[in-house]
Image: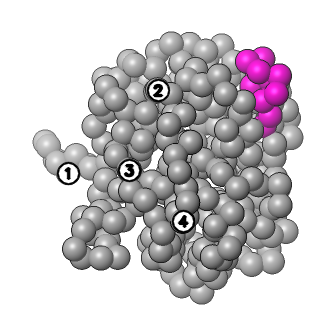
């Protein structure tokens, strides 16, 4: 199974936790790709995931299956050659657009499961991964909130969330989908730029049930839970963002204890992981210290 994650050095907690959740629910050979880069805007510079972090994760997945791999691609040069100029200053970090460069890497295989690092696996995802992709560029679920406001066709809900996507990279290269998305991100400001570009430009997508990317109400059959931003209206309106590595908040505010066994594995590994990766930006993070 080919898995893709994207992000910078600050995503390592999520990367570790998400990969552990995959290992708990599949014995298949995992080939995990991590796209990362140095990207600067007027506010800050985003730095790549370290080689040490990748080496730690590679050793971790090999303990389950020696054939498993975690491979890093630093795509700083690809970003510099075609930067998402119009969207470098959005509320969403430029790292969300890294996946749009995957088609330029020959080593990336034809079938690829993309996951955000705030996605946790709860059940086997074999049937989802192995579904027929003939004439289909992207498989995903509807965006929980966006489906009401963003439509390509007003006759039906069709706005996909990009946090969990099964990608037919062979067809994407053939149709130029990602190339067109990169060009759109370079010239046109968009809200949630990569997700908007994919929804606007993808012509052969398949919508599957929410259980493959549950963004709202956890169900017994949920395969992937995506810890996205949500809205609460009582006793007052609140915008709430709780990430899966914020363990105390997951327990106290979400009243969610389904992942306690996973959290035990995570906490046993995380301190050594952060020390080996030498990520001072993470170890100095109050959330990290609180959730250990």
Q: Which residue has dot 2 on it?
A: 123
Q: Which residue is mark 4?
A: 135
Spatial CA span between label 3 and label 4: 16 Å
* Front-most of residues 205 and 83: 205
Q: CA distance from mark 4 to mark 1?
A: 43 Å
Residue contact at pointers 4 and 2, CB within 8 angstroms = no
Considering the numbered disc 2 on the image, is that residue within a helix, a strand or a loop? loop
- Badge 1, how many Cα within 10 Å: few under 14, some, many 20+? few
SS of the residue at dot 4?
A: loop
Marks 4 and 2 sit apart, C-alpha to C-alpha, by 27 Å
Q: x%, y% of residue 6?
A: 66, 51
Percent position of residue 83, x then y: 71, 76
Residue 237: assigned label: 1
Whichever of labels 3 and 4 marks the residue nearer the N terminus, that label is 4
Residue nearer the viewer, 115 or 131: 131
Identify the residue shown where x is 69% and y is 43%. 2
Q: Is residue 173 visible?
A: yes
Quadrant of residue 191 in the image?
bottom left
Q: Which residue is mark 3?
A: 208
Image quadrant occupied by the C terminus: top right
Q: Nearer the viewer, mark 3 or mark 4?
A: 4
Residue 152's spot in the image, x, y percent? 35, 76
At label 4, counting other C-alpha atoms closer than 10 Å, the crowd grade (few under 14, some 14-19, many 20 or more) is few
Numbered range of the magenta stretch:
60-70
Residue at coordinates 52% horizontally, 63% vertically from top-left? 136
User: First in sequence: mark 2 or mark 1?
Assistant: 2
Real-space CA distance between mark 2 and mark 1, rounded to the nearest whole angstrom: 33 Å
Percent coordinates x, y for residue 270 in the rendering? 68, 22
Q: Earlier in the sequence, mark 3 or mark 2?
A: 2
């Amino acid at each position: 199974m080919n898995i893709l994650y994207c992000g910078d050095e600050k995503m390592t907690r999520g990367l570790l936790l998400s990969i552990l959740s995959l290992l708990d629910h599949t014995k298949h050979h995992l080939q995990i790709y991590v796209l990362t880069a140095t990207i600067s805007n007027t506010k800050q510079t985003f730095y790549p995931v370290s080689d040490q972090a990748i080496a730690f994760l590679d050793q971790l997945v090999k303990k389950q299956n020696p054939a498993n791999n975690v491979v890093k691609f630093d795509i700083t040069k690809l970003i510099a050659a075609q930067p998402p100029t119009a969207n470098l200053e959005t509320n969403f970090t430029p790292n969300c657009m890294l996946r749009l460069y995957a088609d330029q890497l020959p080593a990336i295989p034809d079938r690829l499961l993309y996951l955000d690092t705030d996605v946790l696996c709860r059940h086997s995802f074999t049937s989802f991964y192995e579904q027929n992709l003939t004439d289909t560029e992207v498989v995903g679920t509807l965006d929980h909130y966006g489906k009401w406001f963003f439509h390509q066709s007003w006759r039906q809900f069709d706005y996909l969330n990009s946090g969990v996507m099964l990608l037919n990279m062979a067809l994407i290269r053939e149709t130029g989908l990602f190339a067109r998305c990169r060009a759109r991100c370079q010239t046109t400001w968009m809200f949630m730029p990569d997700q908007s570009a994919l929804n606007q430009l993808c012509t052969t997508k398949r919508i599957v049930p929410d259980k493959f990317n549950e963004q709202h109400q956890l169900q017994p059959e949920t395969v992937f839970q995506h810890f996205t931003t949500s809205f609460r209206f009582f006793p007052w309106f609140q915008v709430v963002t709780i990430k899966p590595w914020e363990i105390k908040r997951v327990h106290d505010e979400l009243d969610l204890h389904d992942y306690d066994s996973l959290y035990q594995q995570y906490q046993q590994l995380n301190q050594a992981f952060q020390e080996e990766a030498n990520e001072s930006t993470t170890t100095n993070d109050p959330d990290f210290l609180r959730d250990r």
